[in-house]
Amino acid sequence: MKPSVIIISGVAALLLVGLFFTAIGVSLPQTRQVNNAEGSTLDITSEQGAPLALLVLGVPGLIVGLAIPLYITLWYLNREVKKAELMPNQPMELLQIGGGGASEQNVPITTLLLNNALAIVVGLGVVMVGIVVVILLATAL
């Protein structure tokens, strides 16, 4: 038998035992160290419950909220990779701008962007890192 099946079966058995004790009204022995609800781990006040509920509901909501755009982005990138695999191999030409030749003056902007994609992405990355460093330095002061 696989170890994962044993572990899952053990957890399920513990949950069933707990459900049985809860259903028949028998509570497991508990040690009460304080009588104040604010300091107890067994009791909860409304001031403690509201942030806990927001945390329990908010964290999965944020995870799903971040997962959806990530999924869409990865799906789009995968689609583009599959398109690129079907195209014939072509050598990559970098930095086509500024040659001054007559043939380069009538090149559409989309072609210039596609030919210089690596330089644009690296440049944007450097700018973003610079912005983050400036923000971190500004908040540290």
Image (spheres, grey):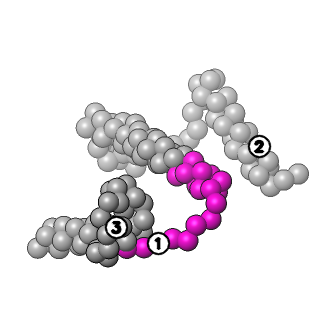
Helix, strand or loop status at disc 2: helix
Spatial CA span between label 3 and label 2: 69 Å
| Residue 28 pos. (x, y %) | 58, 38
Label 2 sits on residue: 9
At label 2, the amino acid type is Ser
Tell me where the magenta segment starts and ends, as one range: 77-95
Label 1 sits on residue: 93
Residue extending furthest toward the left: 141
Label 3 sits on residue: 104
Spatial CA span between label 3 and label 1: 13 Å
Helix, strand or loop status at disc 3: helix
Which mark is nearer the camera, 1 or 2?
A: 1
Using the image, determine if residue 103 lies above or below residue 111.
below
Question: In front: 111, or 141?
Answer: 111
Dot 3 or dot 1, earlier in sequence: 1
| Residue 7 counted in the magenta span | no
Classify mark 1: residues with Cα within 10 Å, few (<14), some (14-19) or many (20+): few
